[in-house]
Amino acid sequence: MPRIKCTVAYDGTAFHGYQVQPNKRTVQSVIEQALSRIHKGAAVKVVASGRTDAGVHAVGQVLHFDTNITIPIEKWPIVLNSQLTEEITIQHAEQVAEDFHARFSVRGKEYRYRIYFDKVRNPFLRNYAHFSPQSLNIDKMREAALLLEGEHDFTSFCSAKTEVVDKVREIYRVEILEEDKELTISFRGNGFLYNMVRIMVGTLLEVGTEKLLPKDIKTILESKNRSAAGKTAPAHGLYLWRVDY
Amino acid sequence: MPRIKCTVAYDGTAFHGYQVQPNKRTVQSVIEQALSRIHKGAAVKVVASGRTDAGVHAVGQVLHFDTNITIPIEKWPIVLNSQLTEEITIQHAEQVAEDFHARFSVRGKEYRYRIYFDKVRNPFLRNYAHFSPQSLNIDKMREAALLLEGEHDFTSFCSAKTEVVDKVREIYRVEILEEDKELTISFRGNGFLYNMVRIMVGTLLEVGTEKLLPKDIKTILESKNRSAAGKTAPAHGLYLWRVDY
């Protein structure tokens, strides 16, 4: 059966995360329902590059599914989008080899986290960026970010709930982009543990507000203890930006 | 009683417009409820520069109310915001003379309308900008926009439902700003009739898609007939940007 790879953007605000859960509205269940309607009621299983939590957004999530329906490949986004809520958009579709797997073939991912600062909240960003009323020392955040780059055991930057055993990951690059009243932190790496980006952001914010020193990142990594790192930053500032294969 | 003038931003998505309506969640009713809590249950009447329709946003709506409560003026935004949903933010407060009136003292207003074009919809803009899948001839839209400037009888650009008799308004400037995949049309004038901005945008879009010629604007104005102009553009692209006194 031909395999289709799709790039998908979604506003995670009103979803209980990506993955199917009984009696909850999730991104995966809404996409599978749309595919099922296109397949005359037959169930279609969708595989994504990974799950995202409730409130987390995606600009470039990737998924695959198998289908017998013959629709010209460039029409797939149009056909699927016509069956989807405007909160989810299929950006692109292409046919891939049968051994392509949206999860297992991942070579790297980029996440971005948006923070804005101002005297007062911005109602238009309440679901799309984390509000920081405090001013941040961005130079120190950049210094700390450098210490996160490279191959490390990220136990300290991972939810204690995780079941994954090997917590060694490589972060290729952490970039802090400043624009107007906004900060975007981009994380590129070969893989990310549960809550890892949000804990790294929470820790970088504590460096920004000078509760922590940049060099503390080293100690936190070495301690292999979740409680050594900062708070988990809120979900709504986080975007799965891009997946590489 | 001292009079307070506030600048307010709101995301109009989930409101039934600005103005109080029985059993509907409106911006005014939510602000009046917040003020009433601050005034220990006493009703506080809020007067705004004008109403906005359901789905229409505001970046710089202005309102006033009278109060006997002595809160330092710079604390009013903090106190009010603590009682408000994150969909509404008081940006600024100042004490004004008793003869200041948020509606009657208005000298001019600016509205902005956001349009974006792309191959597919952007889920993050679904409530904040109008999606145009067609490419637009922006030069022609600019030519047409020039013909809207000046003092005209805007009967053709006004909902037939309006009760206002004098439909002469002056538009100081219509500016079309292009950026990336977005177009923002700014309208500055001494006053705007019901649906006037949305009808002007709908008409400019028909010029952009070359259903109308720029010079048709002149004929439409002269006809003094709503049906001569274009469709009313959707509410969610519209922002009350600024009010001048």
Image (cartoon, coloured by chain):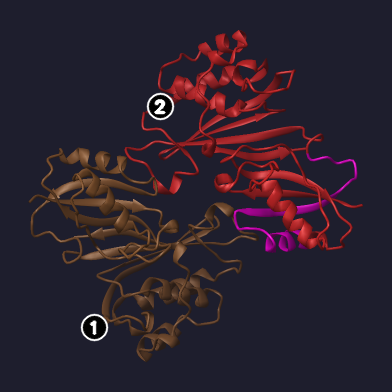
Chain colours: A red, B brown
Residue type at mark 1?
Asp
Quadrant position of residue A53: top right
Q: Where is residue A19 in the image (x, y as percent from the top left)?
A: 69, 41
Q: Where is residue A30 in the image (x, y as percent from the top left)?
A: 68, 52
Q: Report which residue position mark 2 lands on.
A: A136
> Which residue is located at x 60 percent, y 54 percent?
A87
> Which residue is located at x 64 percent, y 53 percent?
A88
Residue type at mark 2?
Leu
Q: Callout 2: helix, strand or loop?
A: loop
- Tell me: B110 left or right of B5: right
Q: Report which residue position mark 1 lands on.
A: B166
Q: Position of residue B99 (x, y in %)?
A: 8, 60
Quadrant position of residue B166: bottom left
Disc 2 to disc 1: CB gap under 8 Å = no
Q: Which of marks 2 and 1 is in front?
A: 1
Whether B222 is drawn above or below A36: the answer is below
Closest to the observer: B90 or A174?
A: B90
Q: Position of residue B88 (x, y in %)?
A: 35, 49
Q: Mark 2 lies on which chain?
A: A
Closest to the observer: A163 or A223?
A: A163
